[in-house]
Image: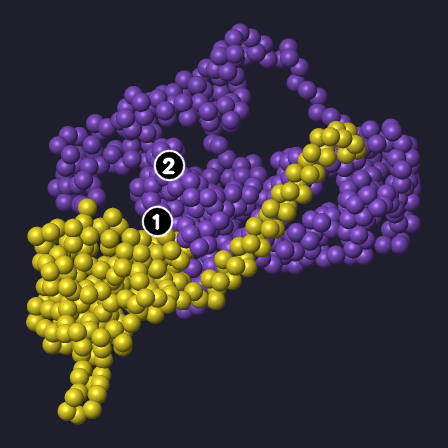
Amino acid sequence: MARYAMVIDLKKCVACHACTVACNVEWNVPPGFARTKVASTGAIGKFPNVMESVFVSQCNHCDDPPCVKPCPTGATFQGTDGIVAVDKDLCIGCGFCVEACPYDARHIDPVTNKVDKCDFCSARLQRGELPACVETCTAHAKFFGDLEDRSSEVFRLVYDRGAKRLETDEVAVGPNVYYLGTEQQLELVAARFAPREPRMPKAGDWWSKVVKPLVFAAVGATFLGQAVAFFYQLWHGEEQFED
Amino acid sequence: MATETAKFPEIPEKPVPLSPQQAEAMAQKQIKKHHVAIILLHWFNATVWFLEVATGAALISSPEFRFAPEWYIRMVETLFGTRSNLLHFHIAVGLAWIFVFAIYGTFGFRTYLLRQVYRKEIALDRDDIRWLMVRALRLLGRSDEPLPPQSNYNAGQKLFALAVYSLVPVIMITGLMMTFHWGSPEWIRAAIVAHFTAVGLIVSGLMVHVYMAAVFPEEKPAFFSMFTGKVNELFAYRHHFKWWREYKLEELKWRRKLELAWARTNGEAGAGATATGDEMATSEERNTTFTEPTEPLASAQERPAAERGSWLRRALRSPNDWPPYAAGFGLGLTLLASFILMGEGLGASSAFVRWTAALLGAVAPEQAAASPFWGRYLGEGQSPLVNFVVFEVIGVMIGGFVSGWLGGRLKVMVEKGPRISNRRRYALAFTGGMLSAIGARFARGCTSGQALSGGAVLAAGSWIFMMAVFAAGFAGAYLLRRDWT
């Protein structure tokens, strides 16, 4: 078993977007969309005390991923190695998971109309390679490894160097992308890119709160009615109904 | 209508009490209610509903939305191997369903959808509304008023049909939206909820439909009519009086035409031959037995050889085909034996492929070896004929010959429909043979190798193939029906 994690050192990142490019090329992500994105907090403060930080986002492969449960067909699932992946064959493109993700790490691919997201380059891992974004990172700011392996670099960075998860008291789902940076920098990032509450679209509420009970009631009532009729029929014998 | 009623005073306009003799005679007489195409369509539809509801229930696995218990979802997943097989099966069956009903709708739009369906299956008349009220009161024990007369379908059936006809398009369209990703995620979400709602509502009605047909004693003749196409006249009189009346009027009209024609052919010979059609009908009406001459049963003495001895001897020597269920069971046992003894299932088309490969290898070895298709068979290191299927097909021919010989059915003939020429039969057989050979290579197997053997080991591809075969056969049969009847 493994528990894959990524550590991103925001002090080292030079915001060159090479990770996005490498990922888009590797996975044929259409222009305008990305599985991993580079963003900025924007300049904060007043000259000369100005501060700005870069932020790199992607799927966090959460311990308790909020995107898995609402997927109607079971296309989104979490593997035993912690990787949250999508079975494209099963995806119908309903986007319940897109709305649920607190990190907005998912998008609907405009070509296939199915959901797309980072899967830590599972296919590359199986070949013994690193994720494309880690391998290509020009500043060596991205680290990838197994948190259950005490000798791994990510283990050292998380447990010795104190890399932090980006979560809030409200949304604590155990993200597995950790960030390194100065304290101020991480505060700034947390303020600007904090995870949001998972959203349930209206259709989902209708489905689980109105339609499902309604269908259960209709089927159940029919079933009960028939059971009564059946026992009535047994009780009175069939002759009464026969012509 | 009024004039017709005047012509047929013997057919009552309102249900009248029947004498025991009349009731007995009517109970014995079977009248046609359903066309064979409708029966086939009904059972095709029933199969599709069963498969789609069974697989659809397992497809919704989200803990937020699922309604089937987890063990059921696991069980169906295991049956299909992977969830993706499950989804593809659900989609394939659904598409076959849409395809068949699209054909039905296209060919029979005017006849069925407009005239038949609307008038007979949906539109509620005054009697229907009364029927619903009386039925409800009777159920509550507040009334023992007789139910108003009904047409082919009673008001309850009509209401259900109305729900089905309005919800089925919703199911089809939302299914297509999800399959082909039509529309934005908002639309797909609405589609999946609408799909579920429509199916759920129909299923609750479907339960009544199945209960009424299979369990409720009053409607038993209706159930059997979905196999035989016929109901007894008494049932029609009691439950579908208006339809019964139409049927009788039509029957009398034809009877009168026949009488007239009969009278003309016989000239003055018949006693009442000078009577006009109308008088004929009334005289006919008086001895109102309406019995048709029954086919004389072939007496037992006529076929002694095949009828003597043990059941096995009789089965082997019978000039008739086995009943299909017995033959199917026997075929299943043969398939099982093939799996146990040979380690592979039955096949047919690949034997022909191997024969062709061997022929090509003998005639044009280089060209055949260079072809990616034929080269595969020639590159095995031994003759392509060294294969179970090749010998199996030879065995089938010998076995078929022996079976025909034992049953005394050997003769040289062209098997064809009664109205077509031998030449047309040859042309059709050749065309159909070409098409099925091409199709068998597309599907990597024919009805034997793909549908039978693959279906027996629950291969998803084989089941999809089978669905496609039935759907295409169903559609094609319509076009070629005159070649066989």
Q: Which chain is purple?
A: B
The picture places residue B408, in percent across and down from the top left corner, at: 49, 17
Residue at 52% in and 12% down: B311
Q: Earlier in the sequence, mark 1 or mark 2?
A: 1
Residue at 8% in and 52% down: A151
- Which numbered disc covers residue A68? none
Q: Secondary structure at mark 2?
A: loop
Inspect this view and state whether residue B394 appears: no
Hey, which quadrant is residue B398 in on the image? Answer: top left
Q: Amino acid at mark 2?
A: Leu
Closer to the camera in the image, B43 or A40: A40
Q: Left or right: where does residue B167 sit relative to residue B346?
A: right
Hey, which quadrant is residue A173 in on the image? Answer: bottom left
State the separation of the CA atoms marked 1 and 2: 15 Å
Which residue is disc 2 drawn over? Answer: B458
Residue that sits furthest to the top in the current view? B309
| Rendered view: B315 above or below B470 | above
Q: Tell me the shade of chain A.
A: yellow
Closer to the camera in the image, A15 or B92: A15
Q: Residues within 10 Å of mark 1 (few under 14, many from 20)?
A: many
Inspect this view and state whether residue A222 appears: yes
Q: Secondary structure at mark 1?
A: helix
The picture places residue B277, in percent across and down from the top left corner, at: 87, 43
Q: Left or right: where does residue B153 sit relative to residue A164?
A: right
Q: Left or right: where does residue B386 sit relative to residue B392?
A: left
Residue at 42% in and 40% down: B71
Which residue is disc 1 drawn over? Answer: B84
Residue at 85% in and 45% down: B143
Q: Amino acid at mark 1?
A: Ser
